[in-house]
């Protein structure tokens, strides 16, 4: 049986035609109501030949707010916007999970509704600056969530998970990576709580597990994934024992029989996701998690093939390569070259640098042209 990057794989309830996953990427193209529209649907449809699309991180709460154009899934207009996306992706033969998050201490305090404070497990500010409503400013010191408030935030995740299902998503990915609210709970550098959500790792993981259990109750474990970034630390998030912390979490997620675990660990050392001083954790997490493992972080086709061949991962997700190459799977198949991504358009809004990267079979009348799987079957 074929087991390479372009071979089929069943994960949870889904049969994937290949193991090339579109990694979650915020692109700031939603409307002022934080609902995706036509242009967003077109962007995802162009990438529907991937084994699985994981959407941009979508906020579960109006209190999780950042730059304009970021998407959310807490109200009816947003559900309608995402329904447009899922209907079109499914019509093109694709599969799509929604990534769900709360920004926590990385929310933009200059844009909070009613001037509400930003929140986190503990009152420790994120390092670095944010581009606020009036230009770059330091992150604000968050207010520590009261124990009695945490059920309400889990409830926002629950409502968002229900909304994702109403919007026709095939499943959800719980975003426990990159220093956002869930990650802030997981690590002892940002979680100094003394209640049942802080202290030992079982307590620090409680918030993530409560969210995951809501997702499992709504979608079934076979339609739920989770994302972790054990090495990430550029924003000052840190843990005194990343190996112990993330091994525990991987084991607990495996016990819940999730569809997959998504681990960001760059194959190129020296990136924010793989500092040279840290020992790679992917093998330990592979052992600890009982289920399909999705690897991410500066993978090339060759590195991804090697990771799968050596059993380090079952699937690989690609971010930057998917921005510029909507037909990445076909490019892998043909071993062709790639378009280069233009970082100045990553969050710029509009069609340029979003839906105008040409596919290999681009037709001259404009607009990338990708054969749907139905067309492929017709030959
Ligand atoms: C423009 C952009 C937006 C991103 N947004 C998200 C996001 O919403 N959620 C997330 O988990 N990671 C996000 N990431 C990180 C990517 O998913 C991925 O982990 C990272 O780019 C490394 O993968 P790559 O080397 O294949 O690009 C983003 C990356 C880029 C370039």
Image (spheres, rainbow, N blue to C red):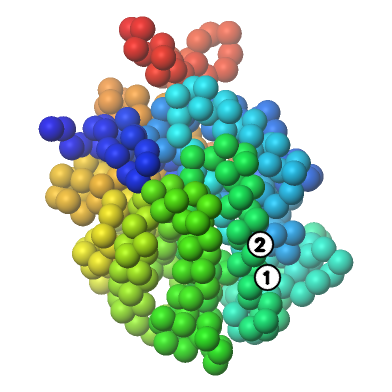
Per the rendering, the mark at residue 114 is none
Residue density around tag 2, few if under 14, some if 14–19, many if 20 or more, within 10 Å? many
Check if mark 2's residue and mark 1's residue have beta carbons within 8 Å: yes
306 w.r.t. 242: above or below: above
Secondary structure beneath label 2 = helix
Toward the front, the furthest residue is 217
Residue 274 appears in which quarter of the rendering? bottom left
Is residue 110 visible to the viewer in this orientation of the structure?
yes
Q: Is mark 2 within 8 Å of ligand 1?
A: no
Q: Residue at x 45, y 29 (%)?
A: 94
Question: In the displayed structure, would residue 265 be above or below residue 68?
Answer: below
Dot 1: element: helix
User: Split into 4 quadrants, where in the image is the N terminus?
Assistant: top left
User: Residue 16 at x, y = what percent?
Assistant: 34, 34
Quadrant position of the C terminus in the picture: top left
Residue 251 lies, in percent from the top left, at: 31, 69
Question: Which x, y percent locates residue 230?
Answer: 38, 68
Question: Which of the two residues, 299 or 149, is positioned nearer the viewer here?
Answer: 149
According to the image, label 2 marks what residue?
156
Which residue does the image show at 53% across and 8% down from the upper left?
364
Q: Which residue is mark 1?
A: 152
Q: Is residue 115 left or right of residue 178?
A: right
Residue 136 shows up from this direction: no
Q: Is residue 257 left or right of residue 137?
A: left
Marks 2 and 1, how far apart at CA: 6 Å
Residue at left 53%, top 28%? 89
Left or right: 351 with respect to 306?
right
């Amino acid at each position: 049986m074929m087991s390479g990057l372009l071979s089929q794989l069943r994960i949870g309830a889904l049969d994937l035609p290949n193991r090339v996953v579109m990694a979650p990427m915020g692109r700031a193209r939603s409307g002022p109501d934080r609902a995706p529209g036509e242009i967003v649907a077109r962007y995802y449809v162009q990438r529907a030949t991937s084994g699985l699309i994981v959407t941009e991180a979508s906020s579960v709460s109006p209190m999780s707010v950042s730059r304009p154009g970021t998407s959310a899934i807490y109200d009816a207009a947003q559900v309608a916007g995402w329904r447009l996306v899922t209907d079109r992706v499914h019509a093109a033969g694709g599969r799509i999970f929604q990534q769900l998050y709360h920004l926590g201490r990385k929310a933009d305090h200059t844009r909070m509704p009613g001037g509400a404070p930003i929140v986190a497990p503990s009152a420790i500010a994120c390092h670095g600056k944010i581009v606020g409503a009036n230009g770059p400013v330091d992150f604000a010191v968050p207010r520590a969530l009261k124990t009695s408030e945490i059920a309400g935030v889990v409830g926002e995740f629950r409502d968002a998970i229900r909304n994702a299902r109403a919007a026709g998503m095939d499943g959800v990915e719980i975003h426990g990576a990159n220093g956002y609210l869930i990650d802030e709970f997981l690590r002892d550098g940002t979680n100094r709580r003394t209640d049942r959500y802080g202290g030992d790792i079982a307590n620090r993981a409680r918030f993530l597990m409560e969210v995951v259990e809501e997702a499992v109750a709504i979608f079934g474990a076979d339609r739920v994934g989770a994302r972790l970034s054990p090495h990430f630390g550029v924003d000052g998030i840190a843990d005194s024992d990343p190996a112990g912390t993330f091994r525990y979490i991987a084991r607990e997620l495996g016990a819940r029989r999730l569809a997959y675990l998504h681990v960001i660990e760059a194959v190129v050392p020296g990136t924010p996701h793989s500092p040279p001083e840290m020992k790679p954790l992917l093998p330990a997490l592979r052992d600890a998690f009982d289920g399909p493992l999705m690897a991410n972080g500066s993978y090339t086709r060759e590195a991804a093939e090697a990771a799968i061949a050596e059993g380090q991962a079952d699937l690989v997700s690609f971010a930057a390569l998917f921005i510029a190459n909507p037909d990445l799977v076909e490019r892998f198949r043909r071993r062709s070259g790639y378009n280069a991504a233009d970082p100045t358009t990553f969050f710029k809004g509009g069609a340029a640098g979003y839906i105008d990267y040409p596919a290999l079979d681009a037709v001259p009348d404009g607009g990338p042209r990708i054969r749907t799987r139905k067309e492929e079957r017709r030959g």
